[in-house]
Amino acid sequence: MSKVESKTEKRLNLTIRATNGATWPTDEFKTNTNVKHVIEKAVAHFVEESAMSEGDYRLALVVNGQAQPPLNEEAKLEDTDVKDGSLLVLVAREPQVDG
């Protein structure tokens, strides 16, 4: 049997920050969770807490106090630089302008 697919699912302790600075410490997500799913759950959490409005957001990893470029939404957390204890921040997607 191949061990290529034998990465173990591990829960990650993450802190997700809303656009207004509110934080959500969570261990709800596993290493094999898609970034897009994390975005959806985080937005729903912050909307329910009245910390944010519904909208189109991306997720960025914060390193040394600086938000990095947004994560690939189709990637799994284990395929990004997100590690246990990471700080992630929701960022508004740039509005599209016609013409």
Image (cartoon, rainbow, N blue to C red):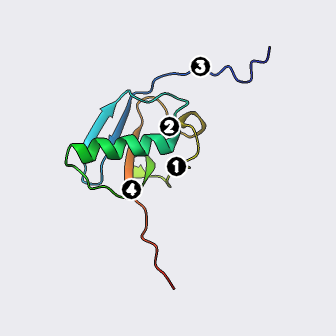
Q: Is residue 81 above or below residue 5?
A: below
Mark 2 sits on what residue? Answer: 82
**Which amino acid, by three-letter code, is at mark 3?**
Thr
Amino acid on which the number 2 mark rests in the picture: Val
Residue 15 bears which disc, if any? none
Q: Residue at x 80, y 13 (%)?
A: 1
Q: Which residue is mark 1?
A: 71
Q: Earlier in the sequence, mark 3 or mark 2?
A: 3
Residue 62 % position (x, y) = 42, 46
User: Between tags 4 and 2, which lies in front?
Assistant: 4
Disc 4 vs disc 1: Cβ atoms closer than 8 Å?
Answer: no
| First of labels 1, 3 by sequence position | 3
In depth, the one of 77 and 46 nearer the eye is 46
CA separation in Å, label 4 and label 1 = 11 Å
* Residue behind mark 3: 8
Q: CA distance from mark 4 to mark 2?
A: 16 Å
List x then y, in percent, for residue 85: 40, 31
Q: Is residue 99 above or below residue 41?
A: below
Amino acid marked by disc 4: Val
Contact between marks 2 and 1 (CB within 8 A): the answer is yes
User: Is there a contact, CB below 8 Å, between mark 3 and mark 4?
Assistant: no
Dots 3 and 2: beta carbons under 8 Å? no
Q: Earlier in the sequence, mark 4 or mark 1?
A: 1
